[in-house]
Each structure stands twice: as C-alpha cells, then as structure tokens.
C-alpha cells in the first residue's frame, strides 16, 4: 500500500471526511492530492494528520506494510521470546537469519541482533559469563559508549546485554541510562523498557552478590511492574527483592513472597523461570517448601 492510500484507508476506517481531516491543517484539495499520491505534505503537516487520525507513526507504518510487523521489530520480539524460553535452537536460527540480513543490507541493527543471539546462546549453555559471550557483546558496548545520547533503540540494546556486564561497566553506563529514561518517561514504551532495565540490573547485582543494590533496584522494578500490570516482570522483581532481603537479614515476609511466586510460576507453566529461580535459591542457600 502506498503513502496516500494508507492515509485514505485510515481516514475512512475512522469515518472522517476529507474536510474533517484536513480542517485547520491543509486544504481539502491538498488532502485529495495526498490520497492520490500527487502531493506529499511536509513533516509537520503529516504528523498533524496522524494526530487528527489518532494513530501513531508506528501504526501508520504497520497499516502501510499491509499489517505485517516490520522485520526488525519481529526479530527483536523473537529474540526476546527465545531468551525467555531458553530456546537454544531458535536462538541459533535467529543468529543465522540476522547474519544473512546484515550481509545483504549492512544494517547495523541486524549486526547487533546477531551478536545478542550468539551471546545468549553462549550464556544459556551454563548460565555463566564466558569469554565468547564477552567477545560477542564487545562491539555493542563500543557502539553504546560512542553515543552522546541514547534513544529507545540504545536503551533496549543496553537492557539486552546487561547480563554480560560487570558492575563497573554498569556504573559507567548508568548515568546515560537514567538521564535518557528521565527525559522520555512519558512514553509508554520507555516506561516498560525502564522496568526491564531495573529488573535486569537487580538480577545482575544478585549475581555479583551486591544485595543492597539488588534490593533497591527490585523495589523500583516492582513498583513499575504493578503500575503497568506486567505480570511476568512483577514475579521476577518480587523474587529478586525477596532473595536480596533474606541475604541482608531483612526477612520480613520474604519467604512467603517466594513461596507464592513459585506457586504462580508453576500454575502459569513458566517452567524456565521456575528453573532459573530454583537455581538462584539453591545458590544462595534459601530453602522454601512449595
């Protein structure tokens, strides 16, 4: 579907006339020319039209692409899904797919996705940081360090490689991360990304046995998961917080929280998540009867 046809389709789906859509933005005749691809509006006019139509730019592209998710977004979602399910075969296929796409397009996004897939494969073999994994994420670290300002893409990249960082590297990146999250905290996707970053950072701190930092990061992650009704993330955040509190000698109701969430994981059939936290509990010598 071409540009003008997309505008026309959305307008008709919204039951708007050309006059209603164009009013105060441009002339009706100009809108008619846009819809027949004989005239292209300036950027400011285009986004005013989208605002009048109550659609985001991403939705516009989705409709223009015949309601197919763009390749980059689709691959990012597949990597996230495969990582959550510890699906090694899918990660291997994604590493091959992204390499092929990078070879064909030279688009750095595919290069980064290939590296993340390979790093996740290396990490998931025994859940420890290996030399191979560090080598895979090194170009991504370099890319992030060279950026003066981060946007959503860079923040998601950072969230994806947190598991491979040292605490010293996290401190180097943290000022940039928090600054950008604060600048864009009104955007829903940034809010969800911030929750994931704080959750992943709390997990990293647990790995390095920095329990005070893990507790503080998990507290904020719990608050955000509740606010945005993120069930999976809320379970993980509460588990991290409870483990950190126990190791700090601040037990409270932490054992009950762990028991409740382990039961929820089993009920929802989050098998890989249950295995992950069972290993964590064993590592920190925390016994909970479920």
Image (cartoon, rainbow, N blue to C red):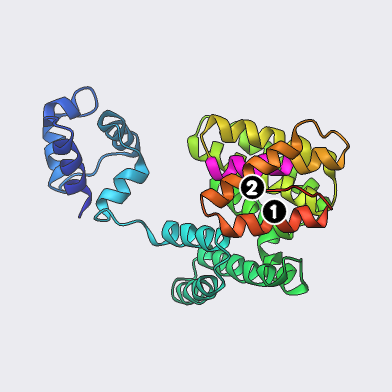
For the N terminus, the image quarter is bottom left
The answer, for residue 162, to whether it is visible in the render is no
- In this picture, which residue range is highlighted in magenta? 231-241
Image quadrant where residue 264 sits:
top right
Indicate yes or no whether the magenta region holds residue 132: no
As drawn, the label of residue 277 is 1
Determine which residue is flagged by label 2: 262
Of residues 190 and 126, the one drawn nearer to the viewer in this rendering: 126
| Residue plotted at (12% across, 47% down) | 36
Q: Residue furthest front?
A: 289
| Residue plotted at (63% across, 51% down) | 159
Q: How many marks?
A: 2
* Of callouts 1 and 2, the N-terminal one: 2
**Disc 1 packing (10 Å; few <14; some 14–19; many ≥20):** some
The answer, for residue 189, to whether it is visible in the render is yes
Residue 12 pos. (x, y %)? 13, 37
Disc 2 is placed on an element classified as helix
Image quadrant where residue 29 sits:
top left
Of residues 84 and 95, the one drawn nearer to the viewer in this rendering: 84
Residue 25 pos. (x, y %)? 24, 27
């Amino acid at each position: 579907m071409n540009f003008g046809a997309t505008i026309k389709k959305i307008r008709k789906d919204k039951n708007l006339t050309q006059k209603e859509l164009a009013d105060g933005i441009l002339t009706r005749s100009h809108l008619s020319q846009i819809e027949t691809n004989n005239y292209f509006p300036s950027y400011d006019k285009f986004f005013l039209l989208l605002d009048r139509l109550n659609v985001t730019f991403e939705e516009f592209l989705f409709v223009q692409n015949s309601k197919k998710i763009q390749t980059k977004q689709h691959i990012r979602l597949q990597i996230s899904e495969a990582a959550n399910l510890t699906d090694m075969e899918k990660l291997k296929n994604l590493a091959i797919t992204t390499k092929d796409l990078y070879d064909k397009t030279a688009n750095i996004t595919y290069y980064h996705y290939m590296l993340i897939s390979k790093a996740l494969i290396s990490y998931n073999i025994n859940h420890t940081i290996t030399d191979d994994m560090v080598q895979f994420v090194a170009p991504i670290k370099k890319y992030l360090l060279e950026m003066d300002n981060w946007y959503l893409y860079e923040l998601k990249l950072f969230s994806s490689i947190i598991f491979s960082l040292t605490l010293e590297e996290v401190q180097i990146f943290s000022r940039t991360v928090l600054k950008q999250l604060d600048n864009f905290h009104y955007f829903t996707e940034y809010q969800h990304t911030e929750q994931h970053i704080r959750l992943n950072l709390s997990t990293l701190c647990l790995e390095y046995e920095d329990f005070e930092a893990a507790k503080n990061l998990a507290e904020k992650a719990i608050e955000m998961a509740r606010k945005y009704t993120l069930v999976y993330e809320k379970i993980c955040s509460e588990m991290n917080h409870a483990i950190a509190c126990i190791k700090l000698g601040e037990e409270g109701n932490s054992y009950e929280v762990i028991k409740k969430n382990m039961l929820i994981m089993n009920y929802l059939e989050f098998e890989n998540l249950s295995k992950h936290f069972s290993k964590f509990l064993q590592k920190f010598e925390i016994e909970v009867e479920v």
